Image (cartoon, grey):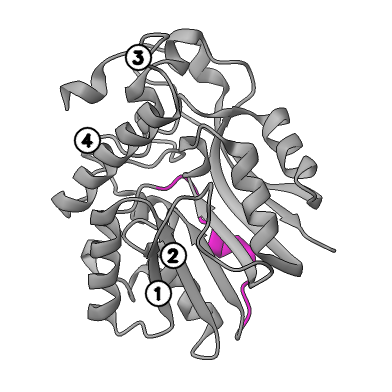
Amino acid sequence: MSELLKVFGSDEFDAGSVEQAVKDRYTQVAERGTAAASSCCAESSSVCCGSETAEMATVADALYESGDLAVLTPEAMAASAGCGNPIGLSEAKPGETVLDLGSGGGIDCFLAAQEVGESGQVIGIDMTHAMINLARSNAEKMGAHNVVFKLGKIEAIPQLDTSVDLVISNCVIALSPDKDRVFDEIYRVLKPGGRFVVSDMVVTEELPDEVRSSAEEWVSCVGGADLLSRYLGRMERSGFSDVEIMSDVPMRPRSDGTAWEESVRSVTVRGWKFN
């Protein structure tokens, strides 16, 4: 873990470094099989997704309705590291194909599977082998026959053009150093008339350089948190229309109460591909 706690030097901080740090952290989350993260947006939380110091409610308990969680395995809930409930706001319909970017242990995929039914399909994408293995194991235990998990990166989604109705993601795009590419890929795989609903960490003021260059802040979904106006602009430049914020929750400042933390927020955003 000490490698993750270092601060990248200017010559070391690049996309490859970020990717490896994220893989290391979420491999550990998957392999522990315990509730390794506290809610990014719950009022009582003092840490963000991926933290190892969660002794309060799990992410799943904080973000989802208890009735929804009843269908999930403990392993799926334990590996959750989100900051919102995108499937709860997406109005997924029976028969639709749903794609979850950064699917982790599969919690949002399994909830989506309940919405689309046996006539629909849910596809989870994750770049971490351990998470894919965990999610597939969870799917087998739950008998979730309409869910599949694929190894891949959200900047290069292993999915055909115009092949899905709905894209969801939960506190994952903040982890990517190439967010423009992610939104371009979301646009590519959506059918005309399709939409995305993503929950993510953003900021309302620019983060200090020492936060943006910290591996620990990146894997905690904060170091890569985009300026909200820029985040929404990326979506529109990729071609999305009617982009709207569906929920906006301030993140509780951590113990040191530094000023930049006041601007960190969890938002859920929806956008449409009309052409």
Q: What residue is disc 4 on? A: 52
Real-space Cα separation, disc 2 to disc 4, in angstroms: 24 Å
Q: Earlier in the sequence, mark 3 or mark 1?
A: 3
Label 3, on which residue? 8
Q: Which mark is residue 28?
A: none
Amino acid type at image mark 4: Glu
Q: Amino acid at mark 1?
A: Val
Determine the secondary structure under disc 2. Answer: strand
Q: Is residue 248 above or below residue 228?
A: below
Q: Which residue is mark 1?
A: 148
Label 3 near label 4: C-beta < 8 Å?
A: no
Give the residue pinned by disc 2.
Answer: 124
Q: Residue at x 52, y 53 (%)?
A: 169
- The region drawn magenta spans 82-93
**Residue 181 coordinates in the image, percent (x, y):** 62, 42
Q: Secondary structure at mark 1?
A: strand
Q: Is residue 72 left or right of residue 53?
A: right
Q: Is any atom of residue 122 visible in this view? A: yes
Q: Amino acid at mark 2?
A: Gly
* Residue found 20% across the figure and 22% down from its top: 3
Amino acid type indicated by mark 3: Phe
Q: Earlier in the sequence, mark 4 or mark 1?
A: 4
Front label number (4 vs 1):
1
Where residue 199 appears, as percent x and y from the top left, is: 55, 48
**Mark 2 vs 4, N-terminal side:** 4
Residue 210 lies left or right of residue 250; in this view the side is left
**Residue at image point 17% right, 21% down:** 2
Please name whichever residue, 16 or 164, is drawn nearer the observer in this view of the structure.
16
Please determine whether, in this image, residue 38 is positioned above or below residue 196: above
